[in-house]
Amino acid sequence: MKKILLLSLILLFPSFLQAGGPWKVDTITNSGVPARWPYDEDTGKWIIHWRVDPGPMTDGAIRVSSEAAVRDWIQPMLTEWQSVKLPYAADADPIQTVAIEFVLDGELPEDITAANYERWLEPGEGRYTPAFVIFDHDGSILEAMGEEYDKNKLVGLAEPLLDSTEMRIRGGYIILNGRMINGNPSSTTDAEATPEQFKAVIKHEFGHLLNLAHAVVNTEIALGCAGDSCNGNQGISTMFPDLRTVAQYTLHVDDKVGISWLYPTQDFQDKFCVITGEIQDEDGKGLQGVNVIASAVNDPWIDARSFQSGALYAIGTENGRYILAGLMPGVDYEVRYEELPVTEETDISAGYDPCSTECPSGFGSGLIAGPDGAASVHCDEGGRTIGMETLKISLAEGRAIDGSVSEGEGGGGGSGKKGWCQLERTADYGLRTTNFLGVFVFILILLAFRLHIGRAR
């Protein structure tokens, strides 16, 4: 069975993952093209057909039939994914920026169980099929899949399946672990998700089915909170690798830009701007696996989007290109590079495609210089592309050696391992922080850097 992308309520199980950008790309010709669902010329949209498991979501205290799950749980979130809107100017109403359509083809002909799941997860090579949404009401399917799939930790998993060109998605599946819904007596863990949290997982997995990878913006916020301390925080994206808050059910700008870039309307291409650039090592070779974020100077936590350098290419391509789309004309943006975050218990960077087994680390973070070495960039009208200066990073010395902007004394942010909290399992809700003071100090330092740059301009 192919490797599967996993989302856990408790921790991340490293697999072949990406951060910020598409998940699956063309590795045959290495064209730099992400995989997409089939495009319909008549409607001008990418069409995703899907079918649902007729079995129940769970046999616990909270029982959700397939019909109710589609009507009350799944359909509303699909509507949100396919109805994404973004403002293209400060005084303009948001416009439709995504051209996708979900088509429900009804129920599968049988309840998917541990005894028959394999033939549904691996349709014949070359066959085009709908995506399958499978309700594993007691975790037995995960248990049958192998020891690496812990039915008492995993909440959901998904995988889009590619055709032979690796440029088009031919089907896919989502498995939802009803054992992890709070109130299910079949569970032996005290870390189940509430129905609201479970819905956030479903929306996350549909993002993967659309071929969105994990995305990391506002790392210091996401890793600096857990459980109730995260609630109401809109700075954590739906596609963040861990479930931290019910607020992840609401799409962040990073989620909206990511899906709009992958399945764009013409308005998205015409009315918004794009930033492009490349990250290299000290020898001038493209460096894959560096997280790059463009955030609005006046609204950095919300108006932010991310992309991992080299995410459009196969492992070992030595191409460090990145693309940051969905920038509003007339707004000043800063472009920051950073290591993918690591904590003692959760190594988010481990196993990220295209980093093979480990992404580059030890160089901290900082600002990437814009045209003419500017600390921030903006475009005057939509449809424009801004080229950033090539950033060179010396992994041996752990610092940027060219293409960065000085942030004053201590600029660069130090190692990404400093200041972020350690995470432990808890009985009531996933994760808790054990180093909140370090996180608070880190945020104060980051805000001081931003203030310093603003005064310098």
Image (cartoon, rainbow, N blue to C red):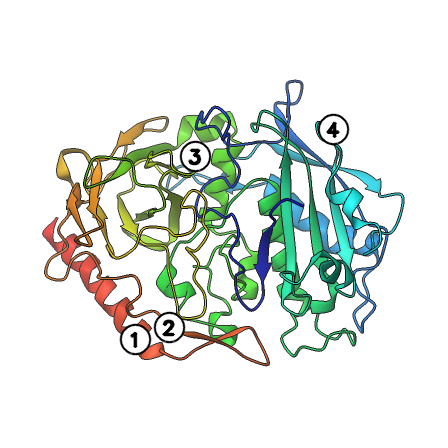
Q: Identify residue for label 2.
A: 421
Q: Residue at x 12, y 48 (%)?
A: 457
Q: Identify residue for label 4.
A: 127
Earlier in the chain: of badge 4 and badge 3, it is: 4
Q: Residue at x 33, y 53 (%)?
A: 299
Q: How far is disc 2 from disc 4 in space, using C-alphas?
A: 46 Å
Image quadrant in which you'd find residue 48: top right
Q: Position of residue 320 (x, y in %)?
A: 32, 37
Task: Say what secondary structure mark 3 lies in.
Answer: loop
Labelled disc at residue 438: 1
Q: How far is disc 3 from disc 2 in space, using C-alphas?
A: 31 Å
Q: How far is disc 3 from disc 1 in space, using C-alphas?
A: 35 Å
Of residues 268 and 421, the one nearer the viewer is: 421
Task: Say what secondary structure mark 1 lies in.
Answer: helix
Picture layout, residue 358 above or below residue 443: above
User: What amino acid is at disc 1?
Assistant: Gly
Badge 1 density bin: few <14, some 14–19, many ≥20, Cα 10 Å: some
Q: Identify residue for label 3.
A: 312
Q: Are marks 2 and 1 in contact (CB under 8 Å)?
A: yes
Labelled disc at residue 53: none
Q: Position of residue 314 (x, y in %)?
A: 44, 35
Badge 3 density bin: few <14, some 14–19, many ≥20, Cα 10 Å: many
Tell whether 126 sits left or right of 352. right
Residue 380 seen in the figure:
no
User: What amino acid is at disc 4?
Assistant: Arg
Task: Say what secondary structure mark 4 lies in.
Answer: loop
Earlier in the chain: of badge 3 and badge 1, it is: 3
User: What amino acid is at disc 2?
Assistant: Cys
User: What amino acid is at disc 3?
Assistant: Leu
